[in-house]
Amino acid sequence: MQLKSRSDFRVARHRRVRRKISGTSARPRMAVFKSGTSLQVQLIDDEQGVTLAAARTARAKNVAAAAELGRSIAEQAKAKDIELVVVDRGGFRFHGRIKAIVDAAVEAGLSIGKTAEPAQEASREDNDA
């Protein structure tokens, strides 16, 4: 039996999450990654396979730097008329720096959407009436 590393388990968690969420041009996926030296955030349109915006810390990996990173990505998103995103935590626990990034982005004006498509939600409401 081969022993698995912590990163193998994180990748497995990330794959499980990615089966359920994907980004569109109207509601991109906000992918968060933390390495040993930096934090990175991307807004990704999975339908076309392009990165719409990206931000990264330079050798700072504390909560204050994470909050600044969240504000930075929110400003870039607003410049591209993006108001709604879906969060991809990358297999990491949603606490500490990951939570600080998302909270700062929400405070700066981004809205966190659900994984269902907005058109599907509207059609469900029409069926209920």
Image (cartoon, rainbow, N blue to C red):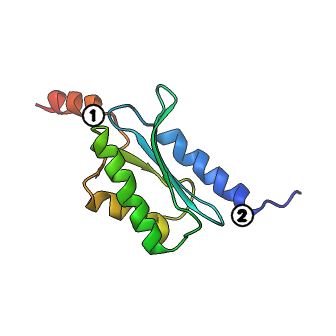
For the residue pair 53 and 97, the one nearer the viewer reads as: 53
x, y (%) of residue 114? 33, 45
x, y (%) of residue 75? 32, 51
Q: Is the residue 48 above or below the residue 101 in the image?
A: above
| Quarter of the figure with the N terminus | bottom right
Q: Residue at x 48, y 25 (%)?
A: 48
Q: Which residue is mark 1?
A: 118
The kind of residue tagged 1 is Pro
For the residue pair 127 and 120, the one nearer the viewer reads as: 120
Q: Which mark is residue 6?
A: 2
Q: Is the residue 118 above or below the residue 55 in the image?
A: above
The furthest residue to the front? 58
The furthest residue to the right? 1
Q: Residue at x 39, y 59 (%)?
A: 70
- Disc 2, SS: helix
> In the rendered view, does 77 fall on the left or right side of 47?
left
> In the rendered view, does 86 fall on the left or right side of 81?
right
- Disc 1, SS: helix
| Quarter of the figure with the C terminus | top left
> In the rendered view, does 83 fall on the left or right side of 14?
left
The kind of residue tagged 2 is Arg
Regarding residue 95, the answer to whether it shows in the image is no
Regarding residue 118, the answer to whether it shows in the image is yes
Q: Quadrant of residue 37?
A: bottom right
Task: Compare marks 1 and 2 and give the one earlier in the sequence.
Answer: 2
Query: Real-space Cα distance between discs 1 and 2?
Result: 36 Å
Q: Residue at x 25, y 34 (%)?
A: 121
Neighbour tally class for label 1: few under 14, some 14-19, many 20 plus, Cα within 10 Å: few
Neighbour tally class for label 2: few under 14, some 14-19, many 20 plus, Cα within 10 Å: few
Q: Quadrant of residue 6?
A: bottom right
> In the rendered view, does 68 fall on the left or right side of 9?
left
